[in-house]
Image: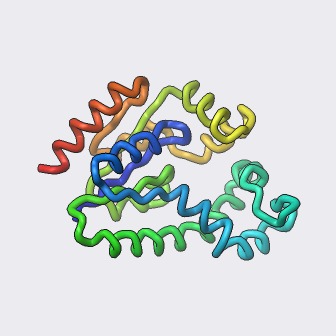
């Protein structure tokens, strides 16, 4: 089994490329989606215990924007949150690998794949890059957050230049056609 690690900064277009790989028959593990589910269910009580009830909305659910504002300005709090979430995401990925053990190729997407060291469990790393102004506008539109909140999140991720040293392939996300063409080229090489 070949494990593709897909990474890139917030708003770079990882989900778009992940969906492309899914359409091409590759089982894909989306770390962000899994961590969101875990925050709502299995890890909710631990997170509330660590960060307080003020991160919850009126229904008692964790408000991810409030939690984000709290942790993305404080590296120690972000590390505490990651220490709660990452082990559970790793377990979920282990289950995913077992479920798809007959697949010749699987994909693991994670924004901080390299920063967290999870890239070491992958055979091939693909980095998605996009100009910063596009990334900022995408995240503001997608998450409904302010410009400065996006910048706070970006500060907690490595730069593309730093990540490129770990990447086997780089896809520039400036147009969908070019991005899909590059993904196809990479996919053909991986399948060989």
* Residue that appears at 68% across and 55% down: 75
* Residue that appears at 39% across and 28% down: 176
* Residue that appears at 58% across and 25% down: 133
Here the colouring is rainbow
Q: How many marks?
A: 0
Extreme left residue here?
192
The answer to which of 176 and 55 lies nearer the viewer is: 176
**Image-based side of 90 in relation to 39, left or right:** left
Q: Position of residue 48 (x, y in %)?
A: 78, 70
Residue 147 lies, with reference to residue 29, above or below; the image says: above
Quarter of the image with the N terminus is bottom left
* Residue that appears at 24% across and 65% down: 103
**Residue 167's image quarter?**
top left
**Residue 10's image quarter?**
top right
Q: Position of residue 36 (x, y in %)?
A: 61, 60
**Image-based side of 58 in relation to 140, left or right:** right
The answer to which of 113 and 179 lies nearer the viewer is: 179
Q: Position of residue 188 (x, y in %)?
A: 17, 42
Residue 41 lies, with reference to residue 149, above or below; the image says: below
Q: Position of residue 94 (x, y in %)?
A: 40, 73
């Amino acid at each position: 089994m070949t494990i593709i690690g897909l990474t890139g900064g917030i708003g770079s277009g990882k989900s778009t490329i992940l969906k492309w790989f899914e359409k091409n028959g590759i089982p894909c593990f989306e770390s962000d989606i899994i961590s969101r589910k875990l925050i709502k269910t299995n890890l909710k009580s631990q997170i509330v215990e660590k960060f307080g009830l003020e991160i919850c909305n009126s229904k008692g659910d964790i408000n991810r924007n409030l939690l984000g504002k709290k942790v993305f300005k404080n590296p120690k709090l972000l590390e505490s949150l990651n220490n709660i979430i990452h082990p559970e995401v790793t377990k979920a990925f282990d289950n995913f690998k077992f479920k798809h053990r007959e697949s010749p190729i699987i994909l693991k997407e994670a924004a901080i794949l390299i920063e967290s060291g999870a890239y070491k469990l992958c055979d091939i790393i693909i980095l998605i890059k996009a100009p910063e102004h596009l990334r900022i506008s995408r995240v503001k539109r997608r998450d409904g957050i302010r410009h400065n909140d996006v910048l706070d999140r970006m500060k907690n991720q490595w730069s593309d230049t730093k990540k490129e040293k770990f990447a086997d392939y780089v896809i520039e996300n400036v147009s969908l056609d070019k991005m899909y063409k590059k993904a196809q080229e990479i996919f053909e090489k991986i399948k060989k």
